[in-house]
Structure formats: structure tokens, C-alpha cells
Image (cartoon, helix red, strand yellow):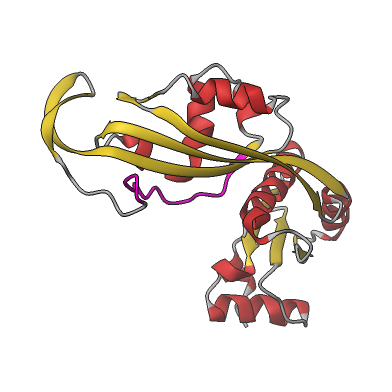
Amino acid sequence: MTVRSDFYQIVLRFPRLFPDPAVFEDPIHLANRYLMGNGIPREKADLVHQTTDEIVPVDDRGNPSTASGTAKYPFEGRTILAEYMTNANIHLDYADFGTGLTPSDHSRLWTKGKLGGLRFELRESNHQAQTLNIPDVSELYRILKERATPNTLSTIELDNVPERMFRAGLAYIQGRLRADAKADGLEVEVYAASDLSASEKAGLERRLTRESSKSTIFVILSREPVSKSELTVG
């Protein structure tokens, strides 16, 4: 199946970047939280999948930012003394899988310039339409559901997906499968082969009697809670 998405690469510049949890806590969902905080409904924000999983502030030359000083900062209803970085830039990459927001909408939302208690400016915003060729997720779920007695294991190959979009494609597939499984009262787990330990990957490969690749995604569907460790025994 062909899935259309919009890939965004943005740079946020903070005059003073404090260690605010809005930025550094659960960083993989920073874009989602920001969009919801600016009026985008949860069901739409869930269609945004961020590929930047670590926040690494850099200065204007691209070097890692360092603490510039300390200052008072409002945090959770009180004022604390905290270190800050001056003119720190944060790079975020994410994919939009059908929110209905246009590139102009995305830029407009980020130019609001407030994240938690921090002010920033949108320094760069790049957009590229991206088409992904992936297996039919609905058909895969239907087949897995028929075979889940009580569980079943299969794979999806994303070898035709650009490397920079792999994580977004993985998250999109995971979201679709989890929504279908939840509606049927089933459990689903999705793992990228590259995220597994050698022993975990070998155990799943034995179950499938075939080797995986760096573009392989393992999918476990069960009528009872199950994990990869339970399927790799033996």
C-alpha cells in the first residue's frame, strides 16, 4: 500500500534554554505535546510521529551548547535557581501521516514560540512530501487475527522506506495495529529488529525459520498479554 506523509525538519532557537521537562522529558513526543498544547486534538496529534528521539542543544555554529549562567526560573508554581544555555538550537524531525494540517499550518503553530515556560523562535522549517510503500496493514492484521491461537508472530519488511523515515513508518504501523487490536480486545507488540538484542532476535527468527534484516519489523498478536521474551524461549 502507498502511504502519503509530510516530513518536517525544524530548528527552534531558545534565547535562554533552561532544563524544562517540557523539552527534555519524554523527548520523542515533544512535537505531539506541542501540537496538542496549541489546540490540535489528540486523535490528530497521534498521527504525528517524531523521528528525533534525543534533544541535543547546539549553538549557532553547531557545537554542543554549554551552560552560560544561572538565573531564576518559574517551575511548578515556585521559582528556582537553574542553569541555562544561551542561544541554544534544537533540531526536530517528524512526519505527519494525515492530520490535515498544511505546511503553512505547521509553520504557524511553531511560530507561536512557547514551550512550557520557555520562549523560542522558529529559525528553520523545511517540508518535503514523502510517499512510503509499505505492506497493507489492515490485511496483515486480518491474517494475524485469524492465526492468533492464542498468539502468532509475523514480520513486515520496510526495505523500500527511506532510512530517515524508518522510525516514523514503524510508529505509523504500530499505531494502526494497536488501534485495530484494541477494538477487538487483543494485544499487539511491534519491535524493530535493530532494537532487539542478538538473543531476542535469534529467538524470534527461530520461530519464523528465517533471518531478519535491519529493515525487519516483528509483530506479535495475541489473545492474551504476551511479550517477545515469552516467544523466544526454546
Nearer to me, 211 or 40: 40
Image coordinates of residue 101 in percent, x first then y, are: 68, 24
Nearer to me, 147 or 195: 195
Q: Is residue 109 above or below residue 81?
A: above
Could you tell me what secondary structure mostly forms the magenta stretch? Answer: loop
Q: Is residue 140 left or right of residue 23?
A: right
Q: Is residue 16 magenta?
A: no
Image coordinates of residue 33 in percent, x first then y, are: 49, 30
Nearer to me, 123 or 102: 123
Q: Is residue 52 magenta?
A: yes
The residue sitting at 72% across, 37% down in the picture is 97
Q: Is residue 111 left or right of residue 13?
A: right
The residue sitting at 35% across, 25% down in the picture is 116
Magenta region, residue range: 49-61
The residue sitting at 82% across, 51% down in the picture is 141
Q: Is residue 34 left or right of residue 161?
A: left
Image coordinates of residue 50 in percent, x first then y, are: 56, 44
Instruction: Say if residue 108 shows up in the picture.
Output: yes
